[in-house]
Image (tube, helix red, strand yellow):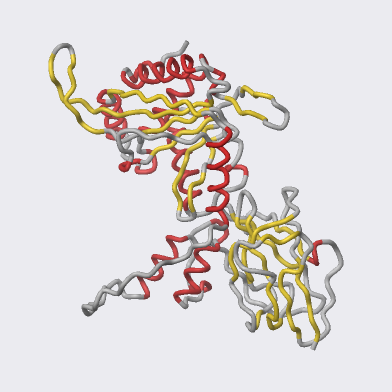
Amino acid sequence: MSEYVFKLPDLGEGTVESEIGEWFIKVGDQVNEEDVVGTMMTDKAAVELSSPVSGRVTKLAGEPGDIIAVGAALVTFETGAAVSAPAGANGGQQLVAEADTTEVGTAVIAPEPATQATTTRPRVMTSPAVRRMAKEAGIDLAAVPGSGAGGRVTRRDFEQFVKQTAGGTAKAVPPRAVATREDKEIKVIGLRRIIAERMAMATREIPHFTYVEEIDVTELESLRRHLNDKNSGKNDRLTLLPFLGMALIRALREFPQCNATYDKERNVLLQHGPVNLGIATQTPAGLKVPVVHGAETLSLSNLGQEIRRVSAAARDNSITKAELSGSTITITSLGKLGGIVSTPVINQPEVGIIGVNRAVERPVVLNGQVAVRLMMNLSSSFDHRFVDGYDAAAMIQGIKEMLEHPATIFLAE
């Protein structure tokens, strides 16, 4: 018997340490070469690590949430024979950059070829969340057909497989006594920890100025329905977001100081030419902000398609790192839960965020008469260090005018 120490490899992006996200193994488990042992968290993604050897786990470096330095011992294995680490850096590991192994926000670390040929079954590509659900349900992911790129198993694939294997019928559950719920400690780790830190930093460092305006979107909704009726393709159906995006893009031409990011280290405010539109998206893992790069170059239809695409990719964890960075201004919407008013927190290092509240029919006075109109509030926040209140209000008023008279969104200057 011999001991093999698997050290944390360099995960890229200049990281010198990483947080343990989740273990898929425990001390005493027998692990095969290339089995995924767990995930490590970076600022952008959960990175899966696979075992470089076969053996029994004798020691783990820590628990989820613990920080491990690059090059430090991560997992210790007891192997059946002497195993020498493959030549090269990072403990014999290399970052796989092929398209069929890089997932939505999830990178994969795979071992270099072993010194002795071994027979291993193909590794199933999926996200850590799906892998965890499969483990808890006792389902072999190799049996689940994958519809994603390169045969990747998505959350929808897994849920559909579970329904099919269950026969699609619900079993009667006998009544039972309601158990008393106990307190539960939930460790703040991974993406949730990153979200918490960034939210705290944004509210601590940025003097938020919030401006709320109500907008009559009756005509806009009529136009949206008309365009959707003309285009029966489900993938091309428009929501209100691309119209708001188009109006925001036009407004930013007059107020470029709102399409900016602040470099704290250099004390420089960078006004951007392109509009890289962030779309705040709620996902099973927490809030993410996928980005539509170069939104000002897109038509209404293409902008709607891109918003749907990056939002869906953020939810099913197939989004790339590039699509999760580089935003210059963000739109956030709670959809049907939008409420009357909200106070959006600015997505650093941006200086502005536009919040969409729920659209509801309300009686309003129009031309001296009471009429039922579809009304919606925009709740927007700006960094008051760099955006004056007058300019912020004026930009929102410009967006209001375009949304209330939607034909003006498409007028050339």
Q: Nearer the viewer, residue 105 or 214?
A: 214
Q: Is residue 313 left or right of residue 75?
A: left
Q: Nearer the viewer, residue 371 or 206?
A: 206
One can see residue 297 in this view = no
Vertically, is 250 above or below 45?
above
Q: Is residue 250 left or right of residue 338?
A: right
Q: Residue at x 39, y 29 (%)?
A: 379
- Residue 345 position, x and y percent, is 48, 36
- Residue 177 position, x and y percent, is 24, 77
Q: Place residue 77 in its image quadrant.
A: bottom right
- Residue 408 position, x and y percent, is 37, 16
Vertically, is 316 above or below 165?
above
Q: Nearer the viewer, residue 167 or 257?
A: 257
Residue situated furthest right in the rendering: 87
Q: Place residue 228 in its image quadrant.
A: top left
One can see residue 185 in this view = yes
For the N terminus, give its image quadrant: bottom right
Q: Nearer the viewer, residue 288 or 294?
A: 288
Q: Residue at x 61, y 36 (%)?
A: 326
Q: Residue at x 45, y 55 (%)?
A: 284
- Residue 92 position, x and y percent, is 80, 66
Residue situated furthest left in the rendering: 369
